[in-house]
Image: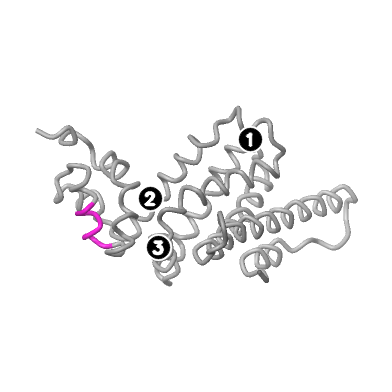
């Protein structure tokens, strides 16, 4: 009897998730990748396929959830607390890039799946979840409109950074890190400007949608 025989389907998803991209890089986000990961982890293949009955999106969702968890392990609260908010966000995104780096081909394939018209809503939810995990790790406790605007802007920063990252062959992904730093600086400038307008009690309203659009499709 295998040690994995008593695991629930959710536990099997969590167990296989970090292994899936290694196989998805060659087999795509398809059942073959699930079968290979199951063999590697001594999980019954039929049960593993049942755990990922939701197909490619379920596999990618589980992998990204494992990245969320690994990011928190890599940067515990006591380490982040010594940094400024700007540096916390940069450190958290960079931690994700470091975790994704060994599986860039799988990430490239995952982004292609997420870009399909039928997957756009789910892709947005995954981006929001990543941004929420990062802001919470950074110590954000906002419950007003700022809760939503912070996550919207960070999800756009993260998405645009990933698009640079998958094609970045610079040493230690220096180009991606520089790109990220510029985007985060844009966000901080926007937050400062927003605060000035709020304190002034009037004036021209800042367009969040226009700002987010610039973050998603900036000049590199």
User: Which badge, 1 or 3, comes first in the chain's sequence?
Assistant: 3
Q: Nearer the viewer, residue 80 or 143?
A: 80
Q: As rendered, which of 209 and 46 lies closer to the eye?
A: 46
Which element carries disc 2, helix, strand or loop?
A: helix
Residue 137, percent from left and from top: 58, 37
Horizontal arrangement in the rendering, residue 120 relative to residue 56 (left or right): right
Can you tell which mark lies on residue 139? Answer: 1
First of labels 3, 2 by sequence position: 2
Q: Position of residue 138 (x, y in %)?
A: 62, 38
- Compared to residue 27, the image places residue 37 above or below, namely above
What is the crowding at mark 2: few (fewer than 14 residues within 10 Å), some, or many (at least 20)?
Answer: many
Q: Using the rendered view, name the quadrant where residue 42 is placed.
A: top left
In the displayed structure, would residue 120 be above or below residue 173?
Answer: below
Rendering coords of residue 23 (x, y %): 29, 57
Residue 150 screen position, x and y as percent: 65, 49
Mark 1 element type: loop
Q: Which residue lies under the disc numbered 2?
A: 63
Determine which residue is flagged by label 3. Answer: 105
Look at 70% across and 61% down and name the residue there: 208
Tags 1 and 3 touching, CB below 8 Å = no
């Amino acid at each position: 009897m295998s040690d994995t025989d008593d695991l629930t389907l959710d536990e099997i998803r969590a167990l296989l998730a970090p292994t899936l991209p290694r196989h998805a890089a060659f087999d795509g986000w398809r059942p073959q990748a699930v079968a290979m990961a199951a063999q590697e982890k001594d999980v019954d293949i039929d049960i593993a396929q049942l755990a990922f009955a939701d197909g490619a999106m379920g596999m990618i969702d589980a992998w990204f959830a494992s990245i969320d968890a690994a990011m928190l392990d890599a940067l515990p609260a006591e380490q982040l607390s010594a940094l400024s908010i700007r540096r916390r966000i940069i450190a958290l995104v960079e931690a994700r890039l470091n975790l994704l780096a060994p599986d860039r081909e799988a990430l490239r394939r995952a982004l292609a799946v997420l870009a399909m018209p039928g997957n756009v809503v789910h892709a947005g939810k995954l981006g929001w979840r990543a941004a929420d995990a990062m802001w919470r790790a950074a110590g954000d406790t906002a419950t007003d409109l700022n809760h939503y605007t912070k996550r919207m802007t960070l999800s756009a920063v993260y998405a645009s950074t990933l698009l640079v990252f998958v094609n970045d062959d610079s040493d230690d992904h220096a180009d991606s890190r520089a790109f990220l730093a510029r985007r985060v600086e844009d966000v901080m400038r926007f937050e400062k400007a927003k605060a000035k307008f709020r304190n002034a009690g009037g004036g021209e309203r800042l367009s969040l949608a226009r700002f987010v659009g610039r973050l998603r499709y900036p000049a590199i």
